[in-house]
Image (spheres, rainbow, N blue to C red):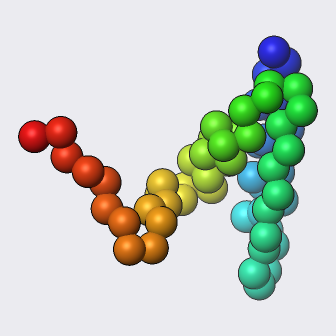
Amino acid sequence: MIPRDTELDHWAEQLKAATGTVFVHVRNFYEGHAPATLMALRHRLGLSTPTPPGQQQMSLF
């Protein structure tokens, strides 16, 4: 596993400077866990965790 924090920091700054709609594709070849990488990038951008349309987080209680 190779940490990619530096690259994520770089891309977060690039995305913050972007104007208009931006689509991001994450292919995490080195760590093998693209969803976690995408969530780390969202965190760096100050974005919340998305919930799929029509779905809510279920409760255990």
Against 28, residue 25 (above or below) is below
Residue placed furthest toward the right: 29
As drawn, 6 above or below 12 = above
Q: Which residue ends up furthest to the top in the rendered image?
A: 1
- Residue 32, can we see it? yes
**Which quadrant is the C terminus positioned in?**
top left
Give coordinates of residue 17: x percent, y percent.
79, 68
Q: Is residue 3 above or below residue 46?
A: above
| Quadrant (top left, top right, bottom left, bottom right) of the N terminus | top right
Which quarter of the figure has residue 27? top right
Task: State the image quarter where residue 22 is shown.
Answer: bottom right
Q: Is residue 15 above or below residue 11?
A: below
Work out whether residue 6 or residue 51 is closer to the camera in this orientation and state it.
51
Q: Is residue 55 left or right of residue 52?
A: left
Q: Is residue 14 left or right of residue 35?
A: right
Q: From the viewer's perspective, is 1 left or right of 55? A: right
Counting every numbered tag in the picture gives: 0
**Position in image of residue 53 (x %, y %):** 45, 73
The residue most toward the left is: 61
Residue 13: x and y in percent read 78, 55
Q: Residue at x 79, y 70 (%)?
A: 23
In the image, residue 20 lies at what x, y percent?
Answer: 77, 84
**Residue 30 found in image quarter:** top right
Q: Nearer the viewer, residue 30 or 7?
A: 30
Visible residue check, residue 44: no
